[in-house]
Amino acid sequence: MVVLCRRDRFDRFRQVRTRAEGGDKRFSDPTWKESSLHSSLLKAYLAWGEAVNGLVDKTSLSNIDKTRAHLITEILIDAVAPTNTMLTNPAAVRKFIDSGGQSLCTD
């Protein structure tokens, strides 16, 4: 039973990771795969998100309340994505450098 639980968590993590690496355009920059720093940051972000979702799954909430809690946690997880900050977003850093800092001044 423990092996199945671990395998289920691994399968869910792999699905989330595949979604982020393949289908999530926020992580489409090649730096997310090529840089060990960014790759580790992405893995930590995905693991944290999966842990938060796992906490909701373990609650004794009703199905409708679990659905609501998952919506809230997904919003939270998306809000703290490493792509949302200048220093951890490789595309934003590249644009900042290429524009000589002017990318911060545009609307």
Image (tube, rainbow, N blue to C red):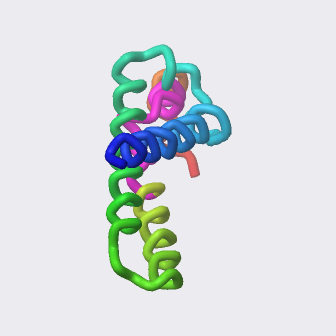
Q: Looking at this rendering, what residue extends furthest in the right direction?
A: 23
Residue depicted at x 35% and y 27%: 40
Is residue 107 rendered to the left or right of residue 96? right
Where residue 51 sits: x, y (%)?
34, 52
Where residue 41 sits: x, y (%)?
35, 32
Q: Is residue 65 above or below residue 50?
A: below
Residue depicted at x 40% and y 66%: 57
| Magenta residue span | 79-96
Viewer-proximal residue, 85 or 36?
A: 36
Magenta run includes residue 82: yes
- Residue 33 visible, this angle: yes
Q: Is residue 8 above or below residue 78?
A: above
- Residue 46 visible, this angle: no
Viewer-proximal residue, 18 or 63?
A: 63
Viewer-proximal residue, 96 or 89?
A: 89
Residue depicted at x 36% and y 49%: 1
Where residue 24 sits: x, y (%)?
62, 42
Residue depicted at x 53% and y 21%: 98
Count of marks placed on residues: 0
Viewer-proximal residue, 107 or 95?
A: 95
> Within the image, what quadrant is residue 25 found in?
top right
Q: Looking at this rendering, what residue extends furthest in the front direction?
A: 1
Where residue 72 sits: x, y (%)?
45, 72
Magenta run includes residue 93: yes
Q: Main secondary structure of the magenta part?
A: helix
Q: Is residue 15 above or below residue 52?
A: above
